[in-house]
Amino acid sequence: MTMRLDYLSIFPAYFDVLDISLLGKAAVNGLVEVHAHDLRDWTHDRHRTVDDTPCGGGAGMVMKPDPWGEAFDEIIGTEPDSSVHVIFPSPSGAPFTQSAAQELSSAVRIVFCCGRYEGIDHRVIDYARSMWTVHEVSLGDYVLNGGEVAALAITEAVVRLVPGFMGNPESLAEESFSAGQDGLLEYPLFTRPVSWRGLDVPEVLMSGHHGRIAKWRRDESVRLTCERRPDLTDSDFGVPH
Ligand SMILES: N#Cc1c(N)n[nH]c1-c1ccc2c(Cl)cn(Cc3cccnc3)c2c1
């Protein structure tokens, strides 16, 4: 089943990058289909206006609802369909998580609405909620200038989980935040040469003793998670006291 991805933005060129790397290969293999659209194509004035001053006053400009509605009609359609997932990156969105990426990886259609300025007229989101399955999400607690970078990050997180996308699906199970990792951060990785600029690969990893290697990796994951992400440690993870 091909996953169709649509991107609505006043900077559609942001999404040209999706033609390269693994995503480009996935498109070639028919796993995903990418369509980027310029929101200004649904304006009708000489200046192709997409913004206006905020009702109630305040700084900056707000994106007008009209172009979004006309773009929705043409790109998605005018009939409700809960199988269509519409994503609004937003500073006030819910944190985007690996489990959200996992859920979205089985979607047949995802439409990313990438706003700019101070944001999109809220009626656009309300209308979308009346028609499709809407996700208002944030990448994290830092400020971006619009939704495009978030849409690219979410795309990569989702598409890499689509069955058939990753050459070696086993590698997905050991990553940070993956279910197989018990919510722990990934352990440190090493490869050849064994000695590099006076720095050596931990001996245990060269021992060939799989039990010891597994214990070292688990201990390292617990140590790193306790140090860097105490918010993920909802239990002791058997941390040695
Ligand atoms: N996702 C995410 C995310 C994040 N993690 N930081 N900033 C954003 C984000 C997402 C969408 C928009 C739209 Cl639309 C306009 N802006 C600019 C802006 C910045 C600060 C306050 N108001 C608007 C966006 C910022």
Image (cartoon, rainbow, N blue to C red):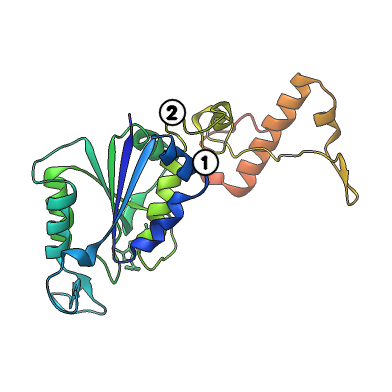
Can you give x and y, in whole percent of width and height, for residue 62 in the image? 21, 71
- Residue at 64% across, 47% down: 227
**Picture quarter with the N terminus:** top left
- Residue at 42% across, 43% down: 97
Under mark 2, the amino acid is Pro
Give SS at disc 2: loop
- Quarter of the image holding residue 38? bottom left
Q: Is residue 231 visible?
A: yes
Give SS at disc 1: helix
Q: Which residue is mark 1?
A: 232
The CA distance from mark 1 to mark 2 is 27 Å
Vertical placement of 11 versus 206: above or below? below
Can you give x and y, in whole percent of width and height, for residue 197 in the image? 88, 52
Q: Nearer the viewer, residue 156 or 214?
A: 156
Q: Is residue 85 left or right of residue 13?
A: left
Q: Is residue 241 visible?
A: no
Around disc 1, counting alpha carbons within 10 Å, would you say few (fewer than 14), some (14 to 19), or many (20 or more)? some
Can you give x and y, in whole percent of width and height, for residue 140 in the image? 43, 55
Q: Is residue 8 left or right of residue 52?
A: right
Vertical placement of 222 versus 151: above or below? above
**Picture quarter with the C terminus:** top right
- Quarter of the image holding residue 55? bottom left
- Residue at 22% across, 67% down: 40
- Residue at 55% across, 30% down: 167
Kindly identify which numbered label has been placed on residue 41: none
State ligand 1's quadrant.
bottom left
Q: Which residue is mark 2?
A: 163
Q: Is residue 99 left or right of residue 226?
A: left
Q: Nearer the viewer, residue 101 or 68?
A: 68
